[in-house]
Amino acid sequence: MDLSLVLASSTPSMSTKMLLHPPRRNSSSFLANKKFRVPPPTQCNINASTKVSDNSQAIVRRSENFFQPSIWHYDYIQSLSSEYKGDVYVEKSQMLREKVRMMLFKVENSVDQLELIDVLQRLGVAYHFNNEIRNMLDNIYNLMDNSKKDNNLYATALGFRLLRQHGYDVSTDMFLSFQDEMGNFSQHSSIDVEGMLSLYEASFLSFENETILDEAKDFTSKYLKEYLSKNNDESNDHHDHYLSLLINQALELPLHWRIPRWEAQWFINAYEQKKNMNPLLLQLAKLDFNILQTIYQEELKVSSRWWKNTGLGDKLSFARDRMVENYIWTVGNNFEPQFANLRTVITKVNALITTIDDVYDVYGTFEELELFTDAIERWDPFTIDNLPDYMKLCFLALYNFVNELAYEIFKDRGYNVTPYLQKSWIDLCKSYFIEEKWNHSGYTPSFEEYIENAWVSISAPVILVHTYVLIPQSFKEDELLQYSDVIKYSSMILRLANDQGTYERENETGDFIKSIQCLMNENEVSETDARERIKSMLSIVWKKMNKEAHDSPLSNRFKEIAMNLGRMALCMYQHGDGHSIQYSQIKNRILSLLIQPIQDNIYV
């Protein structure tokens, strides 16, 4: 079956249906059999001094040396420090924010307002001005006349992108006036490179069946590539050079798919090269970036100490010790300073996921994994005597973590989230074991079978269930009885991006078959063709995610974090397996975000 034809068809195949509308699992049966109780914070203590013996030297395991040790040593992390913790910088930041706030009140032209909002967002400081930005967008939206033909493509596309991003109902009909009778953009008088770039970025916020934006994406991408080929970096024109920087960045990864914090770090450097940049905005952005960096360093120290105390990194030598990478995901998902606790807890979730994933993929035998999966389903620390010691260590670390978190949430907010947290981990381990059973028997699943299980085994449901119970919002039980479509589409993006990035490493190490191999086997296509089909699927899932994020009653904060999880996947797996391999691109990104402040000599 030719998947490219399937994707172009109005009636998707069963495989595509499964990808885009994953089945709902029966959660009620699990919850109905669970007593709603909050266990005491720590039933079973375990720490780095706990002795772990395997008693299985004769067992042949896949490997204990798949992964290199962490390049981020414990002592180095604990030594991190920054001068920007000082009160003088905090006071300077407050003063700059007030100046920018006054600037916002003075801007009256709607195009100028849109440009200012866009720059604030890309510089990473818009979160300081949420109310002012919302008031501006309300006014722009209320005064917008869709029946009026606006000949400014740049402004129209910018307005569409920002309004849709912030949840306003805007129609693609506003772009009709830029097409000719044949539906082509090329002959319109307002076509220029800034308009093309603005339209290109706007096209990635499309919903399904918005064909005008599909046409816009195709046309603008070709236009922008041709522009770059004619205007290389040798140009002395500051405006052309700045535009070329933006276009190169957009063609590598569109703005809508990029992580806000890394975009801020990149855009600060790019904006500084703009001819008519606003020095006040630049100064605030640099200072704010460096102040947040000091917060992240302190959070990373706390997470690193927790990880050391669990003993998992020291005792389970086969598992990836990736504490810094586990933390960086949380900054990508939610960077604002007031969510320190969320980042710290989800870092622990990520570390436990990484370790348990390696128990299934790297070290455990089939018989041991069957016992471990059964123990997770029972969720009872007094029935794990038949597990090998390394599995007892994993189980107790997970058990204590979930109980302590559930206890804190119940104590602070009165919600009993224990069943939902347990279920997310049970679902994850059961999905891991399904893959292990396939691998053990030599069975090659169809793409449909694979993706039905793989959107759970990628671990996004665990991350997002824990996120849901941690963020300030009104807890609604029915929103956790089933995994929402927001969770499913985020999981799909993470799964497809992961499979693209980890394919080479996992193919070499003989890891379990992934989506690329499924497509190659099922459709008798090359690896290149399979990768292109995965890219097409990613675009379709993003459209569904855009629509669901627009319509879902879930909190805006939760929806944004779910989208950022997908964005973070595209970033971490852009050049390979960034979570496991510690290659130079990811190392440099981590350094720029957590370690190295942006240099400037105008703060004090």
Image (cartoon, helix red, strand yellow):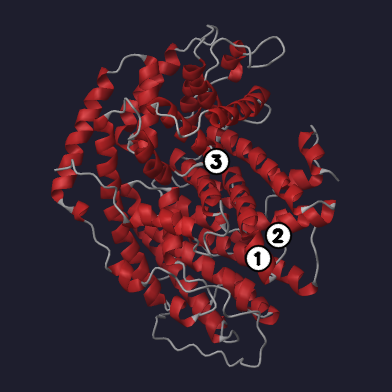
Residue ID at (38%, 37%): 270
Residue 93: percent from left, percent from top: 20, 40
Q: Amino acid at mark 1?
A: Glu
- Judge the density around disc 2: few (<14), some (14-19), many (≥20) Cα neighbours within 10 Å: many
Q: Is residue 410 above or below residue 55?
A: above
Mark 1 surroundings: few (<14), some (14-19) or many (≥20) residues within 10 A: some
3D distance between C-alphas at marks 1 and 3 = 25 Å
Is residue 370 or residue 252 the one in the foreground?
A: 252
Whether residue 41 is visible, yes or no, is no
The residue wearing badge 2 is 514
Label 2 sits on what residue type?
Lys
Q: Which residue is mark 1?
A: 506
Is residue 451 in sight in this rendering?
yes
Q: Nearer the viewer, mark 3 or mark 2?
A: 3
Please report contact status of discs 1 and 2: CB closer than 8 Å, yes or no.
yes
Q: Are marks 1 and 3 in contact (CB under 8 Å)?
A: no
Task: Report how far apart the C-alphas of labels 3 and 2 lie in the structure.
Answer: 25 Å
The residue tagged 3 is 252
State the residue in front, 583 or 319: 583
Along the polypeptide, which appears first: circle 1 or circle 2? 1
Residue 429 percent location from the top left of the image? 62, 67
**Residue 364: percent from left, percent from top:** 63, 79
Q: Is 512 above or below relative to 237?
A: below
Q: Amino acid at mark 3?
A: Glu
* Callout 3: SS: helix
| SS class, disc 1 | helix
Residue 293 in percent (x, y) is at 30, 52
Give me the residue at 43% from left, 66% from top.
323
